[in-house]
Amino acid sequence: MKFIFNLRNPKNKRSNVLTFDELNDAFYKLCSIAQQQSFPLEYALLSKNKTIHTKSKILSLSPFMDNNGQIRVGGRIDAASCPYEQRHPIVLDASHRFTKLLFEFEHIKNMHAGPQLLLSAIRQTVWPINGRRLARTTYHKCVICRRAQGKTLCPKMGDLPSQRLNPDFPFQSVGLDYAGPFNILNRKGRGSKLIKCYLCLFVCLRYKCIHLEAVSGLSKDDFLMTLRRFIARRGKPVEILSDNGRNFVATASELSIFLKTNEVPLSNFASGEGIKFSFIPAYAPHFGGIWEAGVKSSKHHIKRVMGNSHLTFEEISTLFAQVEAILNSRPLCPLSSSPDDYHFLSPGHFLIGRPLSALPSPMLEDMNPNGLKRYERLEQIRQHFWQRWQKEYVVELQQRTKWRINSSNLKVGDLVLIQEPSIPPLAWRLGRVVRLFPGPDGVCRVADINTTRGCVRRALTRLCPLPTDEEMNS
């Protein structure tokens, strides 16, 4: 407009500085152009002082055209003491490009305001049709707001692996984790010092059987000796799943060499097999929820029994064994649907055929049920726990208690932020997705991210996606 004015008035050209009036004139001109493109029929009728159609989407605003050629809101607050621009704002359509640019400008001008504040600031001069939706869209498309918000992806809960569903011997597939530290005494009597010890938890993935071991340190050798004690008592597992702790990773490499060079001394059951180590992605504890739940239950009992007292290594080992017996006596599911049956299936049934805290009972599995008393008949039902486990416990694992729908639509090449708990969201590392790992159900839950420090593998629950080009241009 300034260029056209200077061409028409070569002897009275305006200066290079844009004045407030010139900016306002340009704004009103853009509003008129946007209205003509968004409401062509209404603009033509109002410019001739005619009534608009009854099905028009701006009829409820009682629109009228002012002297400058803009459609304004007639509304019902003409008697209010607020300014004219606020009583009769200019009508715009949220789908027009000019309205989107105006929302983005006001969003940055108001220091990245949220949807509600952004909409109220816009309505001081402009009344956007479907403005609330555009305000939310503008807020979610802002890269700075997306980074500050730090909202990560939430893929659908995965299916249970075969190790959780198919019957086999206890502790064939094992998950393990560390807990602690616990302060203990190095010896009894005077002059004793406080040292640290840790809890190493082994959990059977099939039957939730728990095995607790006291460990004096977190080194590779300490864990290797703990693993040997576990194998000596529970048998050698086929596979071990753990998180990405450095002591576990180091043990896996050393254990593979140990198994290759010392196959003969191992038990006859697994003479030709090695232990398969599988590591879940870093910073993804929900991949090992079964042993995380075991750690939580173990610490629940240990903290309440220990309190602030300091035990010796032998005493805390005894405490861990007692807590292990309690956890292995927890009910998994009822043995029968009868309301008179108070017996339940516990992990102890798969270890010794009964709960660890129960009294021994004679085997009644092959006896005629007609010649048994009521208690003996119930005891016979309890001894069929292998079949009951598959019929009653496994079917209870059908439902997804959370993460029921897949809300992640990540693609290769998308920009993401890598969530780090100890760092604020604006300082999270930026990376680009180079590979996705779909599960058996086709849902991706792990991705490889290329960053300035190299390629890292993270679960999608640790990734915060940034707006893509398609979202920005939509």
Image: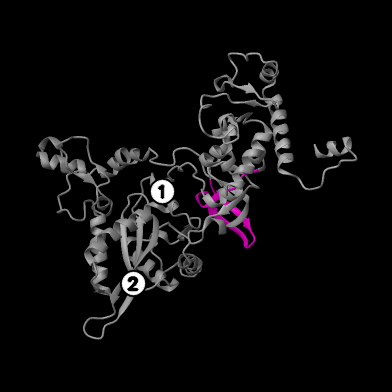
Q: x, y (%) of residue 249? A: 49, 65
Q: Is residue 448 magenta?
A: yes
| Residue furthest bottom in the image | 191
Model colouring: one colour
Q: Quadrant of residue 38?
A: top right
Tag 1 residue = 163
Q: Is residue 273 visible?
A: no
Q: Amino acid at mark 1?
A: Gln
Q: Marks 2 and 1, how far apart in space? A: 31 Å
Report the residue at 74% width, 40% height from top: 22
Q: Quadrant of residue 187?
A: bottom left
Q: Amino acid at mark 2?
A: Cys
Left or right for 300, reference 14: left
The secondary structure type at the circle numbered 1 is helix
Report the residue at 41% width, 71% height from top: 218
Q: Quadrant of the C terminus?
A: top right
- Range drawn in magenta: 445-468
Prevailing secondary structure class for the magenta stretch in the rendered image = strand
74 in relation to 11, above or below? above
Q: Nearer the viewer, residue 442 or 464?
A: 464
Q: x, y (%) of residue 132? A: 54, 34
Q: Which mark is residue 197?
A: 2
Q: For mark 2, does the 10 Å Cα neighbourhood hold few (<14), some (14 to 19), or many (20 or more) residues?
A: many
Left or right for 30, reference 160: right
